[in-house]
Image (cartoon, rainbow, N blue to C red):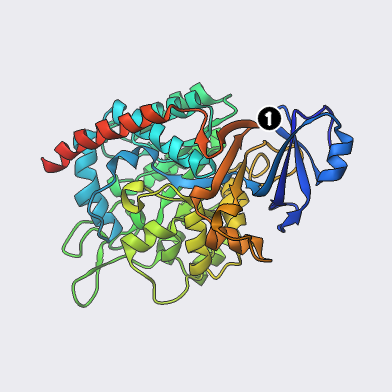
Amino acid sequence: MSSSGDPEFLIEPRWLLPVAPGNAVLEGHAVAIHGGRILDVGPALELRQRYAGTTRLARERHALLPGLVNAHTRACHTLLRGLPVRGPRLRWLGETLAPLERRALNADLVRDGTRLGIAEMLRAGITCYADESPLPEEAARVAAGAQVRALIGLPVADAADGWAEDASAHLARAEALWDEYRNDARIGLYFALQPAKGLSDATFMRVRRVADELDARVVVHLDELARDDGFEGQIQHGSAGPTGVADSAGRAQAPHAGHRLADLQTLGLLRPGFGVIGALGCDAKDAQLFSRHGAALIACPQAELRLQGATAALPAARPLALGTDTPAAVGALDILAEARSAALLFALTPLEALRMATLGGATALGLGTQIGSIEPGKSADMTCLDLDNLGSRPAADVAASILFGATRAQVSDVWSAGRAVVSGGQLRLFDEAELAALAAHWAHRLSLEVAA
């Protein structure tokens, strides 16, 4: 299948995993790239004959996949690694992460942390990410300057934070930023609800109305909807701790997820374009709600396990997409590692897990028609892994070899809209020495803050 125009180059991997229209492993296939998009996909011999004279990029030991999608992260937190991590999640956020962020948060931290985060994600084969940043203007400018594909969260809370003083100010700033990036092909925006900082029913409804007007996505973290009773839109802090409910031993426990999701349904938020982060807190009944209303469930398996503890049984609600959450909790911006964890947690086949890491993430972000699979007409966002570096040739199940044998160190090439951003495992958009100096500077600066 092809469209008009001659390709600028052909990529000829040993194995092609297009994800869609068929989620399979193909050998001896090639991909033709023209104008930043996928022009054609088919047997390599046929494409060589069809596009004679076109530059060929042979990757004889490699597997070619769609670019990985990080459906939820906080890129600037690459600078906040090294903190002690102990759940439950809300307590850790409130008692460990938030105090440091309040002392250290400024535009420089967000700019430099986001820059380092983008570089790390590109090295790991991630070509698109959704970022929940405390200063979205700065995060958006860095992403736009790097010419990567990003969705930047617009925080909304009733309480004051580093961005705005109340809900009205949050929404006013959000609408202004929306106007700035309305026509940007790479930078999108969404509403990142912050109920842990206080969010009333009235504010939820205001966000829903504005999101309807702008056709914007809305995302919330399930754990932040915890409360004692009723839907009050904010965390109740009492003897039970930040999750609001205590067990017989007095340990803080989160209320049943289903009640919280029903509250979202009552407010008209559980629908297409709405995303919930936190799959390990959902059960089969919750999964039915997501399926029925078309909402996206985003799992961050490593962060959820580290901050909530292992579950007694396999989770019943299968997520659509994968995220890394904050690198301050997990340490790495690595969707391949998240896919491996998801495969074990949710009993997925390797191909299902890789689909979740690519087209699943794209679909959850509203970008499924643009990225997430290697199909003609889509943006040429792709990742190539050198499987020869595993020490032996992959077995018959190439997808399993990728998922359970490869790491982000196997990423050799990354293309974003047809432009090479990683070649031979090296970044082409950033100065490696400058990035190392930047990280060292902030490590020293933040160590002083931690000591304080």
**Residue that sits furthest to the front in the current view:** 391
Residue 28 percent location from the top left of the image: 78, 51
Does residue 234 appear to the left or right of 289 in the view shown?
A: left
Q: Look at label 1 and name its amino acid.
A: Gly
Q: Quadrant of residue 400?
A: bottom right
Looking at the figure, which quarter contains the C terminus? top left
Does residue 230 appear to the left or right of 21 in the view shown?
A: left
Given residues 356 and 81, the one toward you in this image is 81
* Circle 1 residues within 10 Å: few <14, some 14–19, many ≥20: some
Q: Secondary structure at mark 1?
A: loop
Does residue 26 appear to the left or right of 96 in the view shown?
A: right
Given residues 206 and 399, the one toward you in this image is 399
Evaluate whether residue 236 shows in this view. Answer: yes
Looking at the figure, which quarter contains the N terminus? top right
Q: How many marks?
A: 1
Residue drawn at (84%, 38%) of the image? 48
Given residues 309 and 31, the one toward you in this image is 31
Evaluate whether residue 200 shows in this view. Answer: no
Residue 99 percent location from the top left of the image: 19, 43
Residue drawn at (39%, 39%) of the image? 75
Residue 354 percent location from the top left of the image: 60, 56
Residue drawn at (71%, 57%) of the image? 23
- Pointer 1 residue: 36
Residue 173 percent location from the top left of the image: 39, 27
Residue drawn at (57%, 30%) of the image? 186
